[in-house]
Image: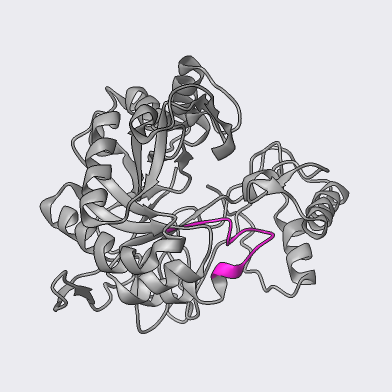
């Protein structure tokens, strides 16, 4: 599977990632064996980027993912987890034991309670707890997880502590993951994060990420991982009762998703093919890294752009060189997004690139669609 450079550091991630919420019993219980087989199948398919969080199953996702990756070459994969929610034994926070965690979406016993904490101490503790559950000695990417209501503290306390962890080598890259585009845009502007995880805000149904965040990330050479590309289910299986952003889909979006499905069926999609929508900034390069006006130039993936300033914890600025192939902050270039937009599951939208483009263009979106784009 193709790998992309993610952010300004040395991380290379597979074009598709394994989101481990499901093996944390998201909505439905799965067994340890099923979780292990799921990770093994992803590995066999070439997936080398795995994402987890303490929130997923009250730590169950961390433990299962760590167990499943045990014995695989550590240098061959990238693992990300998240900070901002501390897990505390339920008995210690007055909740007692018993019941389940389905109110938060996970079919696990409610043995722990989540506590928001974006303080420096809380961030460090969260990272250390995740390392213990994963059974690993480093985190490749640490994301601030859903700091929507804590953005000031995330900027003033959490980000500086993540930067210290990065400097210490405990994490290789730092970022933020939120189900909105405005908060991450602020973090890209005001901090020195390396990558943004953007669930649901750049999909076939929702392109709010294009308003500010994605162009800003391209300018700042910040990597973007597009998550939630099926909008939590609606695009995977459009039907009454399907979910959008983990709740019942609004009628308007349900109708649009059903229309996508109908157009795909009318087009007679060819089974076994996948379609992906590449995201390109103005002044884009082709897939060989060449500018369209320089077809005779070198086939390298672009020249190294000028280093972008690194904001130090003390407020001063240094520099770090962006690796070859990163987006040029001055001239645009290929927006390196770890998941592009998505490679569609063969059973969902097989070979539907042209049909999808037809619907998107009907909605007023201009799509640059390659005939033979594959994952």
Could you tell me which residue is drawn at 48 percent across and 77 percent down? 292
Report x, y in % for residue 185. 43, 72
| Chief SS of the magenta region | loop
Tell whether position 206 is magenta: yes
On the rendered structure, is 187 left or right of 284?
left
Residue drawn at the location 36% of the way across and 71% of the way down: 188
Image height of 102 relative to 328, above or below: above
Q: Do we see residue 326 in this rendering?
A: no
- Residue 291's x, y, as percent? 43, 76
The answer to which of 93 and 253 lies nearer the viewer is 93
Q: Residue at image x 29%, y 52%?
A: 11
Q: Which residues are magenta?
A: 197-209
Which quadrant of the structure image shows residue 194?
Answer: bottom left
Color encoding of the figure: one colour
As for residue 341 lying within the magenta part, the answer is: no
Seen from this angle, which residue lies furthest bottom?
A: 330
Q: Measuring from the top left, give residue 20's x and y in whole percent.
A: 46, 36
Left or right: residue 196 versus residue 158 is right
**Front in this rendered view, residue 365 or 79:** 79
| Residue 90 position within the rendered picture, expressed as x and y whole percent measured from the top left | 39, 30
Residue at (39% x, 66% y) in the render: 151
Quarter placement of the N terminus: top left
């Amino acid at each position: 599977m193709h790998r992309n450079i993610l952010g300004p550091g040395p991380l290379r991630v597979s074009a598709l990632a394994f989101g481990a919420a499901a093996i944390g019993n998201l909505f439905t219980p799965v067994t340890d064996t099923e979780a292990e087989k799921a990770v093994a199948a992803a590995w066999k398919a070439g997936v080398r980027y795995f994402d987890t969080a303490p929130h997923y199953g009250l730590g169950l996702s961390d433990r299962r993912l760590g167990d499943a990756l045990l014995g695989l070459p550590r240098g061959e994969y990238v693992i990300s987890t998240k900070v901002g929610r501390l897990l505390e034994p339920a008995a210690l926070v007055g909740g007692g034991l018993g019941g389940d965690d389905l109110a938060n979406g996970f079919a696990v016993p409610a043995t722990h309670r989540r506590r928001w904490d974006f303080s420096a101490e809380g961030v460090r503790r969260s990272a250390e707890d995740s390392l213990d559950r994963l059974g690993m000695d480093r985190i490749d990417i640490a994301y601030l997880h859903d700091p929507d209501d804590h953005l000031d503290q995330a900027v003033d306390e959490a980000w500086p502590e993540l930067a210290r962890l990065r400097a210490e080598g405990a994490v290789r890259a730092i970022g933020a993951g939120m189900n909105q585009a405005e908060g991450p845009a602020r973090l890209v502007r005001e901090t020195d994060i390396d990558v943004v995880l953007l669930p649901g805000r750049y999909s076939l149904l929702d392109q709010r990420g294009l308003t500010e965040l994605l162009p800003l990330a391209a300018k700042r050479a910040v990597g973007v991982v597009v998550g939630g590309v099926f909008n939590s289910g609606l695009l995977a299986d459009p039907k009454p009762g399907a979910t959008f952003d983990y709740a019942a889909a609004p009628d308007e979006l349900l109708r649009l998703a059903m229309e996508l499905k109908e157009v795909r069926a009318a087009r007679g999609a060819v089974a076994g093919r996948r379609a992906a929508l590449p995201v390109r900034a103005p002044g884009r390069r082709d897939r060989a890294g060449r500018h369209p006006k320089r077809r005779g130039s070198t086939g390298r993936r672009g020249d190294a752009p000028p280093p972008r300033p690194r904001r130090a914890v003390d407020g001063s600025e240094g520099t770090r060189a962006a690796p070859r192939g990163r987006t040029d902050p001055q001239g645009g270039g290929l927006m390196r997004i770890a998941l592009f937009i998505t490679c569609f599951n063969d059973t969902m939208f097989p070979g539907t690139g042209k049909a999808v483009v037809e619907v998107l263009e009907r909605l007023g979106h201009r799509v640059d669609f390659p005939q033979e784009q594959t994952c």
